[in-house]
Image (cartoon, helix red, strand yellow):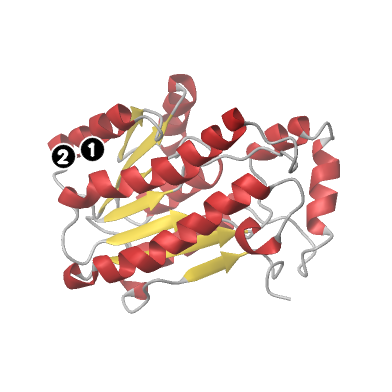
Amino acid sequence: MKLKDKVAVITGGNSGIGLATAKQFVAEGAQVFITGRRQSELDAAVKQIGGNVIGVQGDVSNLADLDRLFATVKEKAGRVDVLFANAGGGEFARLGEITEAHFDKIFNINVKGLLFTVQKALPLFPDGASVILNASIASVKGMENFGVYSATKAAVRSFARTWTNELKQRQIRVNVISPGPIETPALDGLAADANLQVDQIKSGLTAGVPLGRMGTPDEVAKVAVFLASDDSSYVAGIELFVDGGMAQV
């Protein structure tokens, strides 16, 4: 029960890494709030988690939705001990074919949404809170046709460095998880975007992974538990790769 009596907020908690982390956090004793854009998926996630969880529908790129989220958290729990700014998304677009709509969509979710998620949670953080930002190995790998997405994740890494200094007086720890290829529903969207089969996407990704396989959402969630708990009490400002070695060798 590493998170006993902690209050945690997970954006994008209705599927993939966010859902797996919500399950782990609840299993470790936390009261969890999750968000998702689609009410039906959010309801299904709450049912899967089974207890000690509240779903709040919303889009992180919509500031009014974030205000409603944290108003709900304040009313029902009064504080946020752990924030996992997990919501994000990506699409392929090659240089020369990038549209303003593509740029705005990806930056609004991955950068604007993440920034204001953390900023609007600030009044609810007690001293010593833990903030976890979800980035990606894409920020350091230079993946072809993924430039805008990669740039957003580099921005996330930069935020962690700045905020670690800005929040040091309150002993609030800000850290980054950067997953590699993970088996999530997002792969379906990427495959469709690239006019490929999901198996083709997977084989292409795993070819560069020293461990030779895709990771699972649970494997990322266990790292999130570490960064959320007192086990990482002297860990701040880091980028922790969960990538099977893909960005390391």
Q: What is the quadrant of the C terminus in the image?
A: bottom right
Q: Is residue 19 above or below residue 227?
A: above
Q: Is residue 128 left or right of residue 109?
A: left
Instruction: Measuring from the top left, give residue 216's x and y in whole percent.
Output: 63, 53
The kind of secondary structure element at disc 1 is helix
Write the residue at 34% across / 38% down.
51
The kind of secondary structure element at disc 2 is helix
**Mark 1 residue crowding within 10 angstroms, few (<14) / some (14–19) / many (20+):** many
Q: Is residue 3 above or below residue 15?
A: below
Type of residue at label 2?
Answer: Lys
Q: Is residue 64 left or right of residue 62?
A: left
Which residue, given by chain and number where applicable, does mark 1 sit on? 70
Front residue of this view, candidates 201 and 98: 98
**Quarter of the image holding residue 179?**
bottom right
Q: Are marks 2 and 1 in contact (CB under 8 Å)?
A: yes
Residue sitting farthest toward the front: 96
Front residue of this view, candidates 173 and 62: 62
Type of residue at label 1?
Answer: Phe
Total marks shown come to 2
Q: What is the quadrant of the N terminus in the image?
A: bottom left
Instruction: Measuring from the top left, give residue 39's x and y in whole percent.
Output: 43, 21
Instruction: Measuring from the top left, give residue 134's x and y in whole percent.
Output: 48, 54
Front residue of this view, candidates 62 and 6: 62
Which residue, given by chain and number where applicable, does mark 2 sit on? 74
**Mark 2 residue crowding within 10 angstroms, few (<14) / some (14–19) / many (20+):** some
Instruction: Measuring from the top left, give residue 150's x and y in whole percent.
Output: 62, 52
Q: Is residue 88 left or right of residue 6?
A: right
